[in-house]
Amino acid sequence: MKIFGPLYERAMKWAAHERAPTYLTVLSFIEAIIFPVMPEVMLAPMCVAQPRRGWWFATLSLTGSMAGALVGYALGHFAFEALKPVFAALGMLGSIEGGIAIVQAKMAESPWAVFTFLVLGGFMPIPMKVFTWASGIVGVPLPQYFLSMLIGRGKRVYVLAAVIRIGGPRAEAALRRWIEPLGWIATALVVVLVAWLVWRAKFA
């Protein structure tokens, strides 16, 4: 079943639109909150079409992602608060809050305790929303959170712009060829991460 390929093709159509920069910024914003396709799939063809504007397109994508990161952080915090009665009914609230308390204690010892983890997370093919929501739930300090998201996401969009500038259409063709397996790999990683968190909450 193909899901990410068709979404990629839709993003390609957006990339050819005269309002593509606006669409890219909006896509980057939404992807940081809920959308399943990374904005790189739209950024790549835009950089191929106008390589000299690649850095500007990357900056627009980064701006949208950072705005979305703040919204995702807030949603993670308030969604968890709203779902506490559900977790309590399932008998999981105590374990989840215990895990959150452990993370918060480590952050209290060193405000930069999770900074490296979040920066490294930006290098992985894992949707940004996983980190934005999780950071809001555990209450990662905003300065460290914002800087880690800036570095992690900035690395991805600017490296892509550089690769397209050097590799040209061949780099975009490679992305098109691998988008479906990469999408499913990222989805599998998210499912495994969620399953592990649920298992740990119930049995740790």
Image: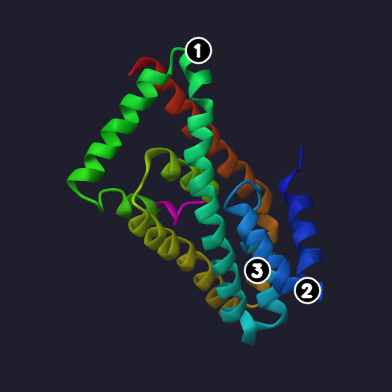
Residue 89 bears which disc, if any?
1
Main SS category, magenta section: loop
**What residue is at 63 percent from the left and 70 percent from the top?**
171
Whole-percent x and y of residue 146? 41, 59
Label 1 or label 3, whichever lies nearer to me, is 1
Dot 3: element: helix
Q: Is residue 154 left or right of residue 114?
A: right
Dot 2 amino acid type: Arg
Q: CA distance from mark 1 to mark 2?
A: 48 Å
- In depth, the one of 46 and 147 nearer the eye is 147
Queried whether the magenta region covers residue 13, the answer comes back as no
Q: CA distance from mark 1 to mark 3?
A: 44 Å
Callout 1 crowding tier (Cα within 10 Å): few <14, some 14–19, many ≥20: few
The quarter holding residue 161 reads: bottom right
Which residues, given as a range, are shown in magenta? 121-125
> Could you tell which of marks 1 and 2 lies nearer the N-terminus?
2
> Could you tell which of marks 2 and 3 lies nearer the N-terminus?
2
Q: Which residue is mark 2?
A: 19
Callout 3 crowding tier (Cα within 10 Å): few <14, some 14–19, many ≥20: many
Task: Work out which residue is located at the far left of the displayed protein and give it.
Answer: 109
Q: Which residue is mark 3?
A: 43
Callout 2 crowding tier (Cα within 10 Å): few <14, some 14–19, many ≥20: few
Dot 2: element: loop
- 26 versus 166 height, above or below: above
The quarter holding residue 75 reads: top right
